[in-house]
Amino acid sequence: MASSGSGYDLSASTFSPDGRIFQVEYATKAVENAGTVVGIKCSNGVVLGCAKPIHHKMVVATSGSYKRIHTCDTHIGVASTGFLPDSRVLVQRTTEEAADWLEQYGGKIPPHVLADRLGSYVHYFTLHGALRPFGAAAVIAGHDPDTKECSLHLLEPNGAPYRFYGVATGKGKQAAKTELEKLNLHKTPIAADEAVKQILRILHLLHQESKDSKPIEVEVSWICEASGWKHKGVPKDVLKTSEDWAKEQLEEEEEDDDDDEEMEEES
Amino acid sequence: MSRDSNYDHHISIFSPQGRLYQMEYCFKSANSGLTGVAVRGKDSCCVVTQKKVPDRLMEPSSVTHLFALTNKVGCCVTGSMADSKAMVQRARHEAGKWAYDNGFPMPVGVLARRMADLAQVNTQSAHMRPLACIGLFIGVDDEKGPQVFKVDCAGHYLPFFAAASGPKEQEAMNYLEKRVKEMKEYDNNEVIRTAITCLGHVLGSDFRGSEIEVGSIEGTDGKFHVLSEEDIENHLNAIADDADA
């Protein structure tokens, strides 16, 4: 069987003998090579976080030009990861869709409509032989001003959008998902400031475990009452206390692990 | 057969045996998803499929394979979710445009034929691949009564008394064929329960209300609606009672 691709993987318009489209699967792999993005839908809002690896010492990481979480219209945030030029196109498209909706219908685009439209857009690139799929995934967090509900959507290169309680994509996707599942978000949603702490903990935990020597810069944003139901970066003081908490947690967990190891050695 | 492997890279190439391999591979992809069953009765029709939420972190309400195309036409699309959504969007657009151009709602048969024609285009031109999804379209036509159409990736479309799609298609069709004579007189409840029982039979399991999705239309004035979990539980209980009796 051609499970390695070999000839069926050259174009998005070609199916393999077992019915797979390899180009889309390869595009998803491109996403897995990039920085992790984590999102949590909370009882009172949505929080997005992403870990940006700083590749060069000379990069000015904290400037506005190396942002990975963008605001598309005041009530929606988009975090994109993967092949970065492709992710920029996705973000631009969300802003265009939102502006288009505002012009046509005179109101703010509902987040699920935006996610659906972006999904159709991304999906189109998986149909044509002359185009290639996007090597980027987008996490859309939004607040619907009419229903007053928050929602979290994940858009992968195959173009199928789903809503999530908690989402992770990028390099640390598997490990982050395991941590998110431990939080039992589908049964007991957590509050937004708790979510900020948990996201920071997860991102720093992944960085520790990844043995990557490059430092990461963490970017966290939220939509909640404290932000006036607008998508904004988490305020610096909240970020600092949450990050300190997260680092403390991780140190404690390490000590616990060390203690366990010692006990095992003794017995 | 090994000669044929040169002919399967592009949709617009026939093999020496006259087969379109890319189309067959597309079917494999479309049939690898969920199983859907559609049944039509005297004045109503319904469509049933499994509800599988692949990830615990996903919101179950965002995972659905049942879509209302117009008020009076619904469908169950199985196969690749991304392709399914593309087909549904196009179908909704076509139905809306048709209603605007012609002044009355698009009948389910006409919509099914239009979607089938669009699917055929992708089998003849090489630059776009066919959509890996199969649609079971249902509606109650003003003149012809309840109708079920199955539209597949190749552009085949046929009206059915009852139809199935997905990995258990063959077993489901066998089950339904045995009941086709009685089906014509079934009322709405019986139609739904037949479809649910068929699905349970081929999947070899009993369901709870949260594990299947049911959509139905009753009467020429009816609207396509997706049943709530409570309604589904009522049907499941009725089926269980009938089985015990």
Image (tube, rainbow, N blue to C red):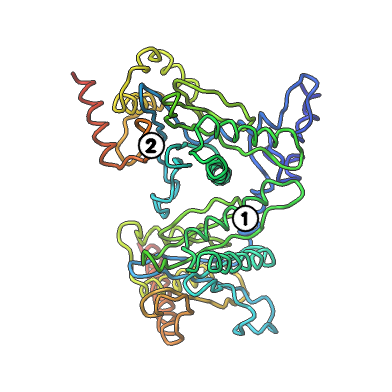
Which residue in the rendered view is the most extreme toward the front? Answer: B103
**Which percent across, then down, holds residue A264?**
38, 62
Q: Is residue B241 left or right of residue A42?
A: left
> Up-down: is A38 above or below A197?
above
**Residue drawn at (60%, 70%), measured in percent from left and top?**
A212
Q: Is residue B7 left or right of residue A150?
A: right
> Up-down: is B164 above or below A149?
above
Answer with the quarter of the image where residue B118 lies. Answer: top right
Answer with the quarter of the image where residue A201 lies. Answer: bottom left
Answer with the quarter of the image where residue A196 lies. Answer: bottom left
* Residue linked to disc 2: B215
**Residue drawn at (36%, 18%), measured in percent from left and top?**
B183
Quadrant of the frame with the C terminus of chain B:
top left
How far is mark 1 from mark 2, CA to CA?
28 Å
Kindly identify which chain the residue marked by label 2 belongs to.
B
**Which percent across, then down, holds residue A112?**
47, 59
* Residue linked to disc 1: A121
Give residue A32's mark.
none
> So how many labels did they put on this image?
2
Foreground residue, B122 or B212?
B122
Q: Amino acid at mark 1?
A: Tyr
**Which percent across, then down, holds residue B99?**
52, 42
Foreground residue, B243 or B203?
B243
**Residue drawn at (58%, 62%), measured in percent from left and top?**
A171
**Which percent across, then down, holds residue A158?**
60, 50
Kindly identify which chain the residue marked by label 1 belongs to.
A
Foreground residue, B73 or A208?
B73
Q: Is residue B30 left or right of residue B205?
A: right
Q: Amino acid at mark 2?
A: Gly
Q: Mark 1 and 2 residues: CB-CB less than 8 Å, in contact?
A: no
Label 1: state its secondary structure: helix
